[in-house]
Amino acid sequence: MSFVRIVKSGAFAAVFVFCLSASMLGQANTAAGKSAVAGAPIPRKAPVVKQLNIAGLRKALTPAGKPLLVNFWATWCDPCREEFPDLVKLDAEYKGKIDFITISLDELSEIARDVPKFLSEMKAEMPAYLLKAEDDDAAITIVSKDFAGALPFTILYDASGKQAYFRQGKVKMETLRAELDKLLSPATTPANK
């Protein structure tokens, strides 16, 4: 047998073994719940979390012609983490009807690490901010007279910026939906008041 024939046979065998191994690996990944085909879901890009100061907070809390829902939370707050999946569902349900933002009270060092990682895991699409205020009391006063600084805190403003609802602690979704529906009903729009 010539050297060229041996090399060709060896190359063919190597390609065959490689293809067989890749096929078996693909089947193993598919059996484990991982797609091995083109068109598989692409991992979510981590959301951009913008830093807010006092002036930015004032601006973020100003409704732009429709009701504004704001959730204050942190990655270290267990009740915040527990309610977040429901808030993501609520965002999808009311998308386009209301504006919804989340404001994290995590440390500034978490703006590029834990906060976007958590939001990505939750598949959150609403705008996300991290508040870093020099004066916490001033920030709390801007949000609401009813905000004591404890988390989670959810507040709903009507389209004119008037506080319509708030909840200190884990929000009850059925109550929040009722408040949103009340604000969105034709009887409560500014033209009908």
Image: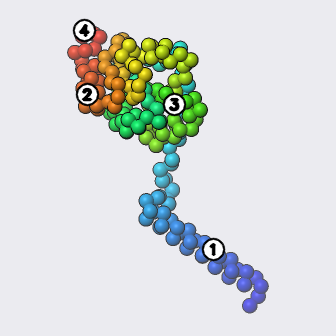
Q: Are marks 1 and 3 in contact (CB under 8 Å)?
A: no
Q: Residue at x 76, y 82 (%)?
A: 4
**Circle 2 — which element?**
helix
Q: Decide: is 16 above or below 158.
A: below
Q: Quadrant of the N terminus?
A: bottom right
Q: Decide: is 108 above or below 62.
A: below
Mark 3 neighbour density, 10 Å: few (under 14) some (14–19) many (20 or more): some
Name the residue carrying label 2: 175
Going from the N terminus, do you reach mark 2 or mark 1 first? 1
Q: Specify the amino acid type for callout 3.
A: Asp
Q: Nearer the viewer, residue 131 or 11?
A: 131
Q: Give residue 15's mark.
A: 1
**Circle 4 — which element?**
loop
Q: Residue at x 49, y 59 (%)?
A: 37
- State the separation of the CA atoms marked 1 and 4: 75 Å
Q: Give residue 193's mark.
A: 4
Q: Are marks 3 and 4 in contact (CB under 8 Å)?
A: no
**Circle 1 — which element?**
helix
